[in-house]
Amino acid sequence: MVKNKKEESSLYGLMAEYDNPQELMAATAAAHVLGYRVMDTYSPFPIEGMAEMLHEHKNRLPKIVLIGGVVGAVLGCAFQYYAAVIDYPLNVGGRPFNSWPSFIPITFEVTILIAAFTAVLGMFALNGLPQPYHPVFNVERFAHASRDRFFLCIEATDPRFDLYETKKFLEGTRTSGVYEVEP
């Protein structure tokens, strides 16, 4: 197979339109079997099992939140230690300046606060948000993706992508139309 790189470099990919989620699932499964890996689906509602079919999903967010929580705990404890021992030591009832039981409530609250912020910011970063523009918006029929149509887009960056072979494959599925997606 000889790939026409000039034509493919001017494309974001090929998009196929489907009437129902079953057809989209079948086409996505067939594309996965053929070796396509850089693809995405668009539908008006979540389709169970689609995420697993598209990606070997590794969720990195829990590790990021754990790191944020540990950083929050260390910062909460360090700030209190600095305030109580170094900056403004007070002898209250003969207890030591670095009395760790009194540090627990604030350390806990700062841990939760930093972990929550890390979760939100990490989710945005891992999802690539905000993204006000995407090449699929250039396809006129894509406006139906949020109403009543289902779309499969195979990107040109996929190693298996060949303009003519991929278009032939997509037309062979039960599609309502195949569209070229301009960048």
Image (cartoon, rainbow, N blue to C red):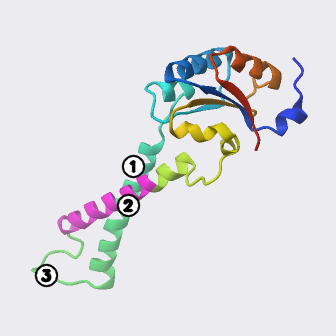
- Circle nearer the viewer, 3 or 1: 1
Would residue 134 appear left or right of 162 to someone viewing this image?
Answer: left
Quadrant in which the C terminus appears: top right
**Residue tagged by mark 3?**
92
96 is higher (above) or lower (below) than 165? below
Q: Which mark is residue 66?
A: 1
Tell which of 22 and 158 is nearer to you: 22
Residue 92 image position (x, y, % from top left): 13, 81
Q: Residues within 10 Å of mark 2 (few under 14, many from 20)?
A: many
**Amino acid type, label 3:** Val
Which disc number belongs to residue 114? 2
Q: Disc 1 or 2, which lies upstream in sequence?
A: 1
User: Who comes first in sequence, dot 3 or dot 2?
Assistant: 3
Under mark 1, the amino acid is Leu
Q: Decide which of 33, 126 is in the foreground and name it.
A: 33
C-alpha gap between disc 3 and disc 2: 30 Å
Q: Name the residue located 54 percent from the left edge and 51 percent from the top edge.
A: 125
| Picture residue at 83% right of the left edge, 40% below the top | 10
Q: Which residues are magenta?
A: 100-120
Query: Is 103 included in the stretch rendered in magenta?
Result: yes
Element type at mark 1: helix
77 up-or-down from 155: above or below? below
Residue farthest to the left, as pictured? 93
Residue 35: x and y, percent?
Answer: 68, 19
Is most of the magenta stretch helix, strand or loop? Answer: helix
Residue positioned 25% across, 83% down in the render: 89
Disc 2 is placed on an element classified as helix
Rendering quarter of residue 15: top right
Mark 1, Cα crowd under 10 Å, few <14 / some 14-19 / many 20+, is: some
